[in-house]
Amino acid sequence: MLKPGVYKHFKGNEYEVLCVAKHSETMEEMVVYQALYGERSYWVRPLTMFSEQVEKENHKGPRFVLVREKE
């Protein structure tokens, strides 16, 4: 289970994971998160994609890394 808290994207920005929700049609688990920079917009991404390993832009490793858990 994905823990709520602050995660760092491999490109450097931080996001706060608010919860894991289910897609109403497919029941796929989706991560609901908020950017902690700029307009602080909200985003959703499939849990499988949020948690996957990536090989992009000189990076090989997790897409997001937990920085600190929500208290």
Image: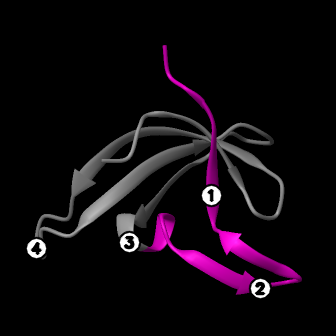
Q: Which residue lies furthest to the front in this view?
A: 61
Along the line of sight, which residue is nearer the eye, 62 or 49? Answer: 62
| Disc with the residue nearer the chain's start (3 vs 4) | 4
- Neighbours of disc 1 within 10 Å: few (<14), some (14-19), many (20+): many
Residue type for callout 2? Lys
Residue type for callout 3? Thr
Pointer 1: what residue?
64
Q: Residue furthest top?
A: 71
Residue type for callout 4? Glu
Q: Give the range drawn in magenta.
A: 49-71
| Marks 2/4: CA–CA distance | 31 Å
Q: Is residue 55 left or right of residue 34?
A: right
| Marks 1/4: CA–CA distance | 26 Å
The answer to whether the residues at label 1 and label 4 have Cβ atoms under 8 Å apart is no
Please tell me whether mark 1 sits on a helix, a strand or a loop.
strand
Residue type for callout 1? Phe
The label nearer to you, 3 versus 4, is: 3
Pointer 3: what residue?
48
| Disc with the residue nearer the chain's start (1 vs 4) | 4
Pointer 4: what residue?
25
